[in-house]
Amino acid sequence: MQAIDRLKLLNQQMQFEPDTDVSPDGRATLPVACLEQRADDLYVHPAVMPNGRHIRLLKTQLTSVCERDCHYCPFRSGRDFRRATFQPEEFARLFMELHRRNIAEGLFVSSGLAGGGVRTQDRLLQTAEILRHKLNYRGYLHLKIMPGAEKAQVERAMQLADRVSLNLEAPNTPRLARLAPHKTFQEELLTRLRWVEEIRRTQPGHRGWNGHWPSSTTQFVAGGADESDLELLQTTEYLYRSLRLKRTYFMAFNPIPDTPLEDHAPTPANRERRLYQASFLLRDYGFSLEEMPFEAGGMLPLLQDPKLAWAELNLSAQPVEVNRADRAQLLRVPGIGPRGVDAILRLRQQATIRDLSTLKSAGILAERAAPYLLLDGKKPIYQISLGI
């Protein structure tokens, strides 16, 4: 099979591996029509860099051969589909050709687990070494860390990549056993994310290829193991607070034919959205897990933004005075995010804020915020909105 045809096979299912920005309302920051573009029959995915720049990101694997039998995964061992494999140098040179043709600006590279985690990680590292040091690639590179990779391999990946990630898939050991019965949550997965943070913390004088250590992320399969939102967010809170992950991604479970979970009900897309919203409250808005508006069974309300649900319980009778509230208080108001708080603090230095139009001019969702605000001691006039 020609190299480009193998790449098409390896690249087709990579929508399951996220590496794009998600806004605080749980939606992608790019229009839906732009979320997947095709070039030469390759799927090229827009991604948002930490500086806000959008790039065309090729997401692929070195091989779709996998020795693990994860119950939800399209690449699981024993599943009947056509597989493909690249050797590191062959793949690196093919990517650089696509890069020169401006088809792909950045690269996300993963792999099926073939020959164990250590051997698979070696192939990923060899690919990255060739790109960085032999072919002089200076663009964005996201490297996966394999289950069972050695600590020295994790460190080397951090020296070569702009981002590293390892998918936990489930929030704890019992749930992972239902999704991936031959993976171990603590030993194979979580320990490697701990190593990433340990390396960053204990080696401040060492940096990655571009002068700083890479960010780190993970992903959960939401609903595949019948876990609760509380379980997912408990682990998410730990990852943000203790391991400084840049982001936790959530993939709503959808059954794949010819897998043990093919008859399992799909997860509502709105659940994925609520999990993103709650995770941003934990990461950026000063909320704790105890403040999340969980319903029966530890689930978030599907029909309401968790920040809005919290505000209705806590701010309806005690609205926030925009002209006197501190940053933490303002962040609790629906419709006001970190940038909106910065804008309010600047506006207050110039004059007293007395109307919603002033907030609107600063990019704040003023009518969403209005029920929970006082403007110079008065409740603002606003049009009622569902605000979901």
Image (cartoon, helix red, strand yellow):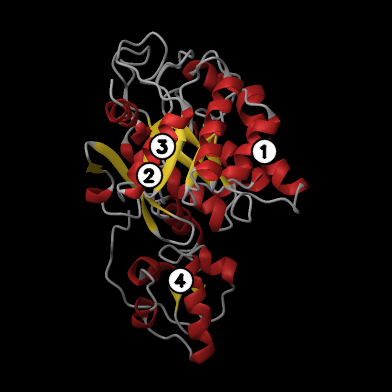
- Who's the residue at 29% across and 31% down the image? 4
Mark closer to the observer (2, 1): 1
Q: Earlier in the sequence, mark 4 or mark 2?
A: 2
- Which of the two discs, 4 and 1, labels the residue nearer the N terminus? 1
- Within 10 angstroms of label 4, few (less than 14), some, or many (20 or more) residues? some
Disc 4 to disc 1, how far (Cα)? 37 Å
* Residue type for callout 4: Gly
Q: Residue at x 48, y 33 (%)?
A: 220
Residue 72 vs residue 65, the one in the foreground: 65
Q: Give the mark nearest the N terminus, 2 or 3.
A: 3
Which mark identifies residue 93? 3
Spatial distance from mark 2 to mark 1, Cα to Cα? Answer: 33 Å
Please state which amino acid type lies under the numbered disc 1.
Answer: Glu
Q: Is residue 60 visible?
A: yes
Q: Which residue is mark 4?
A: 340
Q: Are marks 4 and 1 in contact (CB under 8 Å)?
A: no
Taking depth in this image into account, of 55 and 52 the one nearest to the observer is 55
Q: From what the image shows, is residue 11 above or below residue 116?
A: below
Relative to 167, does residue 215 appear above or below in the rendering?
below
Compare marks 2 and 1 and give the one earlier in the sequence.
1
Mark 2 falls on what kind of element? helix
User: Is 93 left or right of 125, judged from the image as shown?
Assistant: left
Name the residue that disc number 1 marks: 155
Give the class, few, some or many, for how many residues have Cα within 10 Å of label 2's Cα (few <14, many ≥20).
Answer: many
Q: Please, is residue 160 above or below residue 124 in the view?
A: below
Is residue 44 toward the left or the right of residue 60 in the image? left
CB-based contact (under 8 Å), mark 4 and mark 2:
no
Density class for disc 1 (Cα within 10 Å; few <14, some 14-19, many ≥20) is: some
Viewer-nearest residue: 133 or 165: 133
Residue indicated by mark 2? 273
